[in-house]
Amino acid sequence: VGYRWITRFLALGLYALLLMPGFLQ
């Protein structure tokens, strides 16, 4: 497993956390 995949997964997680409140509202 490369760091690229880990960083991509973390980036997607942060993006989801940032976007989720907008969708809930």
Image: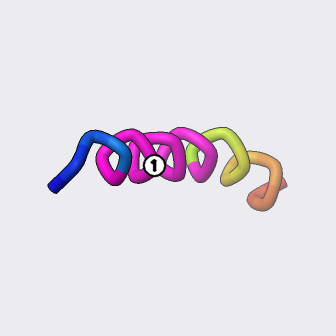
Q: Left or right: where does residue 25 sit relative to residue 14?
A: right
Looking at the picture, how far across and down is residue 9, in whole percent?
A: 40, 52
Q: Which residue is drawn at 51% across and 42% down?
A: 11
Residue sitting at 59 percent across and 52 percent down?
Answer: 16
How far from the left and from the top, in percent, is residue 20? 67, 53
In the rendered image, which quarter contains the N terminus? Answer: bottom left
Secondary structure at numbered mark 1: helix
* Front position in the image: 23 or 7: 7
The residue at the far left in this view is 1
> Magenta stretch: residue 2 in it?
no
| Residue in the foreground of this view, choosing between 20 and 15 | 15
x, y percent for residue 10: 40, 42
Residue at x-position 39% and y-position 40%: 7
Q: Residue at x 27, y 40 (%)?
A: 3
- Colour scheme in the image? rainbow
Q: Which of 24 and 2 is in front in this view?
A: 2
Other residues around mark 1 within 10 Å, as few (<14) / some (14–19) / many (≥20): few
State which region is magenta: 5-16
Horizontal and vertical percent position of residue 21: 71, 46
Toward the viewer: 5 or 13? 5
Residue occupied by mark 1:
8
How many discs appear? 1
Dot 1 amino acid type: Arg
Give the prevailing secondary structure in the magenta stretch.
helix
Q: In this view, does 17 lie to the left or right of 22?
A: left
